[in-house]
Image: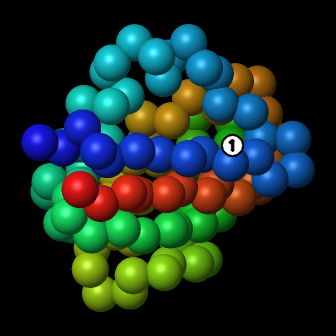
Amino acid sequence: MKNSIAIAAGIVGSFLIAGSSLADGGFQAHMTQCVDKFASASDSASVVLECSAAEGKLSDCKVVENSAAGKGFDKAALCVASFLPIGSKTGTIRVPLKFQGA
């Protein structure tokens, strides 16, 4: 099962993820869908995105680091970014994501 897929959304600068939104189960379901669509849940990867933050959402994200190039985790990370809550942060931020394989 895909329960071993995890995200470690780190903080770069003053980036903050709203914990209550991550705990509701919706985020994990979205994460699983993104990995199922673009990558293999049995593989691991670390991806760093650089995004614009405004109005509680991320936009214009691009991959700046990818430990598993060619395995689809770049696309999975971009998919996940559309669902990450960011609170009131604005400007350009870096978002580190970790995908842990089964």
- The residue that mark 1 highlights is 53
Front in this rendered view, residue 66 or 85: 66
Seen at 58% across and 78% down, the residue is: 65
Neighbor class of circle 1 (other Cα within 10 Å; few <14, some 14-19, many 20+) is: many
Residue 93 position (above or below residue 75): above
Residue sitting at x 61%, y 58% = 96
Kind of residue indicated by mark 1: Ala
Can you give x and y, in whole percent of width and height, for residue 81 in the image?
47, 47
Relative height, residue 47 to residue 70 (above, below)? above
Residue 81 appears in the figure = yes
Q: Position of residue 5 (x, y in %)?
A: 31, 47
Q: Residue at x 47, y 46 (%)?
A: 7
Instruction: Indicate how the structure is coloured in the image.
Output: rainbow
Report the quarter where the N terminus lies: top left
Foreground of the two, 81 or 52: 81
Q: Quadrant of residue 29?
A: top left
Residue drawn at (64%, 21%) of the image: 18
Q: Quadrant of residue 19?
A: top right
Residue 55 visible here: no
Secondary structure of residue under mark 1: strand
Name the quarter where the C terminus is drawn. Answer: bottom left
